Image (cartoon, grey):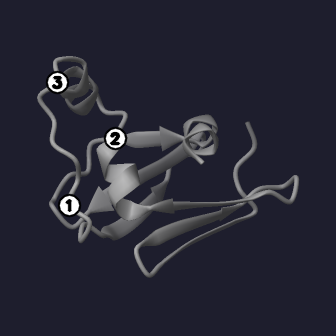
């Protein structure tokens, strides 16, 4: 999966513009709730994770080649979101 041609975070949304022209927008809360790190995945599998608060925001975006590492205002920074996963979420 190719990286987006543009990536921008504003107003509680992450906007991704893909090379094929598709545009995806994902709320920061949706991204936090869908964190792919092993800790969050295990919590979801066992029904032990609450929905992310609507006010959670992205504090940093770190490119990782095959995806991005997102740092959230609640301090969570463990998940690396592959490009293919972000496309599926949209």
Residue on which disc 3 sits: 47
Mark 1 or 2 closer to N-term? 2
**Residue occupying the point 24% across, 27% down:** 44
In this rendering, the answer to whether 11 lies above or below 54 is: below
Q: Secondary structure at mark 3?
A: loop
The residue at 26%/66% (across/down) is: 54
Image height of 38 relative to 69, above or below: above
Q: CA distance from mark 3 to mark 1?
A: 17 Å
Residue 5, position as x, y percentages in the image:
76, 62
Whole-angstrom CA distance, mark 1 to mark 2, is 14 Å
Residue 64, position as x, y percentages in the image:
51, 47
Q: Secondary structure at mark 2?
A: loop
36 on left or right of 72:
right
Toward the viewer: 72 or 68?
A: 72
Give the class, few, some or many, for how many residues have Cα within 10 Å of label 2's Cα (few <14, many ≥20): some
Seen at 75% across and 43% down, the residue is: 2
Q: Residues within 10 Å of mark 3 (few under 14, many from 20)?
A: few
- Residue under circle 1? 53
- Is residue 39 left or right of 81 when viewed as pictured? left
Give the alpha-carbon distance from disc 3 to disc 2, as whole Å. 14 Å
User: For the residues carrying marks 1 and 2, which lies nearer the camera in this image?
Assistant: 1
Q: Are marks 3 and 1 in contact (CB under 8 Å)?
A: no
Name the front one of labels 3 and 2: 3
Label 2 sits on residue: 35
Give residue 63's position: percent from left, percent from top: 52, 55
């Amino acid at each position: 999966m190719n990286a987006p041609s543009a990536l921008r975070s504003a107003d509680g949304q992450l906007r991704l513009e893909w090379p094929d022209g598709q545009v995806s927008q994902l709320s920061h809360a949706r991204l936090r709730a869908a964190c792919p790190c092993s800790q969050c995945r295990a919590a979801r599998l066992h029904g032990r994770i609450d929905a992310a608060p609507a006010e959670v925001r992205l504090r940093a975006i770190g490119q990782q080649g095959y995806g991005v590492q997102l740092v959230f205002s609640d301090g969570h920074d463990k998940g690396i979101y592959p490009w293919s996963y972000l496309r599926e979420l949209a």
